Amino acid sequence: MEQKVIITNNATEELENIISESKNDKFFILTDSNTNKNCLNMLHCSEPIANAHIITIKADDTNKNIESTAHVWKELSDNGCTRHSCLINIGGGMVTDLGGFAASTFKRGIDFINIPTTLLSMVDASVGGKTGINFNGLKNEIGVFNDAKAVIIDTAFLKTLDQHNICSGYAEMLKHSLLKDYKMWVQHINFNLYSPDFDPLLNMIKESVEVKERIVSEDPHESGIRKALNLGHTAGHAFESYAMHTNRPILHGYAVAYGIICELYLSHALQGLPLDKMRQTVNFIKENYGRMNITCDDYESLYSLMKHDKKNTGNEINFTLLKDVGDIKINQTVSKELILESLDFYREI
């Protein structure tokens, strides 16, 4: 099933259109405690949705776990969900990841629709068919590939977000610009994140989603070019998991931004990424994201977490690097010595 991505200024109307054409017997809505309070009332929908059973889980990534998933499964089971029902996930990446996974596994798979409410989920988590949960202290360790029936993107939800969550989502957009071309990258590193203008941002979101969709359509199960989307994520997931282990959690996009710093250093060292482009991107990240405080005593833990990355083969750590903006090199293995050097560079910026 090809995933339908709808970018709109009227999520309610688009959802009603999908429902009117569907053959689903029942609808369920998954929210977290934040989106239940701030976003659900923005959808004034027709009777099937007004009568839908609402399932609410605790907010934030620490609850993206098997216990929350089991709660969703139980609510579906206890309230008559069948193989012909549909789960509508309204929330950020945690909700769309977990809800997609719960739907994909309940009764061997029911339909689900994603309505992302954060910038991060609009440009990344809700699009592309990856679903999953964290397990054993590791990000997205359990999951399946499965496309949503539809993804409805409406920037009206962005007005419910704070500055940190705007920045978090924008890190994935910055990554997409590095993968696409010079023109898109220049636009992204010159965007005012402190006072975002939502009109141009809507077009930037559209272009960002198109970058991801094009790559995913070429390689839906990450056997080749889809690995490009992991730029910043090998180091970034290590930062994110380590922050969780040390009880100082950070938003996913901030971890990706920090990971991009390390991986652009590796790109310059191994692929000859031009120094000026590395510096301009690093400076943009430094100005907008600050940095997570680490010391050289943390290096072994971070390196160990990188070894758990799903892209790895055997004992080799696999990176996506850049020869230039838009010139992607997947499946690049890097020595431990150079990885530790990249952490030195990160600490010294």
Image (cartoon, rainbow, N blue to C red):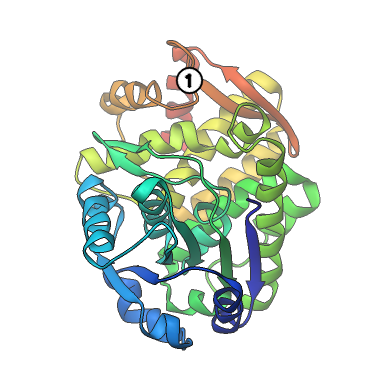
* Residue 222 visible in this rendered orientation of the protein: yes
Q: Is residue 239 above or below residue 338?
A: below
| Picture coordinates of residue 58, whole percent (x, y) | 23, 63
Q: Nearer the viewer, residue 263 or 280?
A: 263
What residue lies at 50% left-to-right and 49% top-to-bottom?
Answer: 286
Residue that numbered label 1 is attached to: 312
| Picture coordinates of residue 332, whole percent (x, y) | 60, 19
What residue lies at 63% left-to-right and 55% top-to-bottom?
Answer: 3
- 327 vs 90, left or right, is right
Mark 1 residue element: loop
- 248 vs 263, left or right, is left
Q: Is residue 282 above or below residue 346?
A: below
* Residue 59 visible in this rendered orientation of the protein: no
Q: Nearer the viewer, residue 203 or 4?
A: 4
Which amino acid type corresponds to the residue marked 1 in the rendered image? Asn
What residue lies at 48% left-to-right and 30% top-to-bottom?
Answer: 345
| Picture coordinates of residue 154, whole percent (x, y) | 57, 74
